[in-house]
Every structure is written in structure tokens, then in C-alpha cells.
Image (tube, helix red, strand yellow):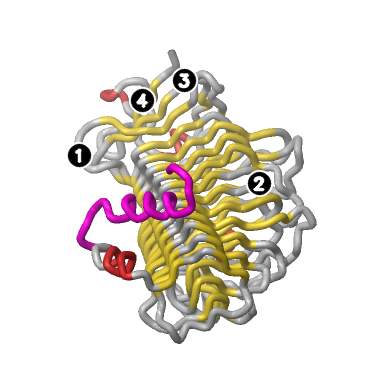
Amino acid sequence: MGRIFYLDAVNGNDENSGIAPDAALKSLEAANQILFGAGDKLLLKCGCEWKGMLCPHGDGDRFQFAQIGTYGDGEAPLIDGNGAYAAILLDGVSYWKVKGLRICNHSSERCVRQGICISAKSEGITAGIEISDCEIFEVDGENRRAMPVYQSMYWNGAVYVTFPGRTSAQDHLHDIIISNNYIHDVRTSGIRVNQQEDFINDIHHTHVVVRGNRIERTGSDGIIVANCISPLIDSNICFDAGALGTLEDTQLIAGIWVCATRDALIQRNEVARTRMFENDGTAFDTDWGTAGTTVFQYNYSHDNEGGFWLDCMKLNHNRDCEKTILRYNISMRDGRGIAVYDQGILTEWYGNLFFHEKPIQICSFDEGENFYFDHNVFCIPQETDWQKAHYEENIVNDSQWLELIQYETQNPNWRDHVTEKLCKFVGVTR
């Protein structure tokens, strides 16, 4: 059994022991002086608010995590970073859980700024961090793309996970889970995983899971995961990525994308209304430095201004990049077309439904010669430009599928029903 420390912004006192509700500490500064160990908890009183940065010290262990949580009744406790680098900074610590807090980081000036930041130690493996059930909003960070390196929008997020330098097989993050958080109205990206120095062949973070988060109205991208082996991006909702951005500042974004990953799996997500500024603006993206096979499956995408999927696999090309598979996805009214660019690497499409009310191009800007479409359903105008992709056993403007599409917003089980039909069409069981 670990110790429990209590923090009460109203009735606490930093002269107290902190080990009982009626002897609670008061300030974040007092909490930052504690050396936590396995099984220890820091509980913040509901209804209270703090300004500044919480930066706990010490490690839990794999059997007993250290934890930051809540106690009492009322609204979840709030930490406003008040312009600090982060509202919560987990700096070089392992085996911590953060759950159930409200987080913001207000400032009148833009710069790289986080809601919750996980920063690994520079040597060895930093392991076992879980961020769950938090509300993170109004993080006044950076959403300008054309800034000096390390000062641009790619270096901050509502939840930002990073390594200080370059990773290796011996030095990286392991077992990082970001789940069931509500992120909204942030000038930054929603969730970002990377290393501070981005090199395309540094693919070392392991067991990184981004699951069940709801992200609405960001200043730049929704979710970006980089430098990871087999990351899982599952069951997230990403609405209105880029809604707080501008053409001049933000320039290029996507809803959910990966770069410098190996064998990433992106599944069961819903992405809608991603903004398109200078270009891009797609729901999904396989970007620079990806290796192995990237899979997008069972996703629901609609009304994204730039299209369904962006192909950037040959930017800073990783020689181990094999292909992207897109299967059992539903794309409704997604902008310019089904894909943006064809960068010469194999892309397999099967069991997907594509619906467009206006004529589109299958592949914007290129001919799509490296795209293989097999057993997909296209409900699109006859004027669509099919280009030079490879097509086999696809259905085009079938009356039964056109009728089924009409129930998109009326039947709560519509997505599951459509996905089952797509799988059956391909000949697999979901």
C-alpha cells in the first residue's frame, strides 16, 4: 500500500502533512516537492482550481503505479498552466497514471505549449504512463507551421508525448496509453507522439496506444503518432481539426496520421470536417518515413474538405516502407477525392464504401497507378475521373447501396450494418 497525499486549493495549507483530507496541502509547488513511490497517490479536491505547472517526481513500478486523481464531490479539479510549458509535466518518470482532471493552459501569447506533457528521460526506457478520462481545453499553444524547427505547431499538443533527442533500441518510451480523454478548443494539435529530433529511421517507441479519445476544434492536426513500432490508434473521434487554424498560419493538416512508424494500425475511428488550407485536409494520412505495412480499417470518415486519405510515403522515404492497406472503411462526401497524391508505393484498397455527390478524382494530382482497388463500393457521379488505378470486382452505383446510404443519419447501427455488408462482399467475417 502506498501513501495518499491530498491537495485542496481552498482549505489546504502547505504546512500540513498532506496525508489526510483535513490536513491537505494547498499548492502545486508543495506537491512538486514530494518524492513519490510505488502505489503513492496525489488526489486533487473536486471543485478546486490551481494555476501553474504540476511536475511530480519519483517513479511507481509495473505492479503499483503512482497516480494523480481526484477526491470529493463536484466538478473535476482544474489545473490551468497559466502560460507555463505544460499544465502537467511528467518529466523522466515511469509508471504513472493521470485520471479525471480538467486541464487548460491560458496565455495571451502563442508559443510551444502543452496541456499534459510526457517527456522521457534521455537515457534508458521510460515506461508505463497512462492519461485517461481528462478534459483538456483552451491550450493556447502554437499553430503556426512556418516557424523555426522546435518552435512550430508540430512540437506541442493538448497531450504531447516526446523523447528529448533521438531514440534508439535502448532509449525510448514504452507502454504509453492515452485513452478516453475529451480534448476540445485547443490552438495546438490534439494528441502528438514523437521525439524531439525527428529522424525518419528512429522507430523505437513501443506499445503506444491512443484509444477512445474525443477531439473537437483544434488549431492544427487531430492526432499525429511518430517514431513508434506498431502503434494502435483505435476508436477515437476527431471533429473539426483545424477549426482554430488559418490558411496563413496552419497551412497543412490532416485528421489522424502517422509518420516514422512501422506497421501502424489505425482502426474504428471517426473523422469529420477536417479543414483544408493550402493543401492536404484529409481524414487520414500515411506520411514521411513510414515502414512496413500501415493499415487503416473500419474507420468512418465524412465531410473532410481535403479528401479521405493522403499519400506521403515517399517524402523522406524509408527503404523498409512496403505498402498501405485501406480496408472496410466508409468515406462519405470527403472533399476532393478518395486519395491525394500517388507517390509510387503500393496501396491496396478493398472492402471500402465511397460516396460522393459531386464529381471527383480517384487520386488528386496523380494518376493513381500504384493503387489497387478490389471489391470496393463506389457511389459517385458518372463524371468521376477514374484515372489509371487498377480496378477489379468493384461495385459502382448499385441501387441497393445507394438506398442504404440514405439511412446514414437515421439508423444508429448504420455503420455496423454497412461494415458487415462490406466484409461479406469481400468474403470475410468481421
User: Circle 4 — which element?
Assistant: loop
Whether residue 246 is situated above or below residue 125 in the rendered picture: below
Give x and y (percent) for residue 270.
39, 57
Please report whichever mark, 2 or 1, sits nearer to the chain's N-terminal start: 1
Corner quadrant of residue 122: top right
Circle 4/circle 2 CB separation < 8 Å = no
In this view of the protein, can residue 53 be seen by the observer?
Answer: no
Whether residue 73 is situated above or below residue 185 in the rendered picture: above
Residue on which disc 1 sits: 74
Residue on which disc 4 sits: 16
Please report whichever mark, 4 or 2, sits nearer to the chain's N-terminal start: 4
Q: Residue at x 41, y 33 (%)?
A: 68
User: Marks 1/3: CA distance?
Assistant: 25 Å
Give x and y (percent) for residue 131.
45, 40
User: Marks 3/2: CA distance?
Assistant: 25 Å
The label on residue 39 is 3
Residue found at the far right of this picture: 319
In this view of the protein, can residue 169 be seen by the observer?
Answer: yes
